[in-house]
Image (tube, rainbow, N blue to C red):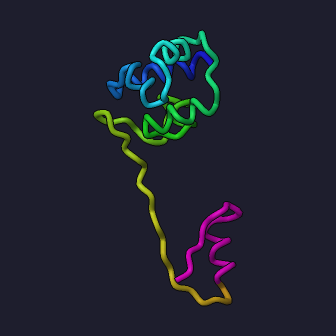
Amino acid sequence: MGNILQNIKVIRANLSYSQEYMAEKLKIEQVSYGLIENGKRKLKYETLEQIAIIFGMSVIDVITHPDIYGKIEHGNIAKTPRVTLQIDIEENIKADVIKLAFGDRILEIKNK
C-alpha cells in the first residue's frame, strides 16, 4: 500500500493539488485526507477510485505510476490516442477477417 500512497502524493504534487483541495473534492476534512495519504488511515478502494477521478486518471494508472497509460503534462492528462478502423467486407467473410486481424481478443464491432 505504501507505493500507492507515495504515488498519490507524487501525482498530487505534479498536478499542484493541495491536500485541502483533495479533501474538498472528496468531501472530507483535510486532516482525514492527510491521515490517508500518510498511511495512518486505511485507503478504501472507493476512495482510491475517487482520487483517480480527481486526478483524471484510471485506478491502474495511479497504482502503477510512473508507468501509466496516460501521461501527465503540465497538470493535464494526455490520453493515448484511440484509433478507429472501418473496413467494408462481405458478410460471409466478416468473421474470418476479424479473427485474422484481432485473433481471440475482445473487440467492439459497430454496425451502421
Q: Residue at x 52, y 31 (%)?
A: 62
Frontmost residue, 65 versus 50:
50
Q: Residue at x 67, y 60 (%)?
A: 105
Q: Residue at x 68, y 79 (%)?
A: 95
Frontmost residue, 23 versus 53:
23
In the rendered image, the vertical position of residue 77 relative to residue 99, given as above or below: above
Frontmost residue, 65 versus 40:
40
What span is in magenta?
A: 94-112
Q: Residue at x 52, y 40 (%)?
A: 58
Residue 12: give x, y in percent of width and height: 41, 24
In the rendered image, the vertical position of residue 64 relative to residue 57, given as above or below: above
Left or right of 105: which side holds 86? left
In the rendered image, the vertical position of residue 11 relative to residue 105, given as above or below: above
Residue 86: give x, y in percent of width and height: 48, 76
Residue 55: give x, y in percent of width and height: 43, 34
In the rendered image, the vertical position of residue 83 relative to residue 2, given as above or below: below
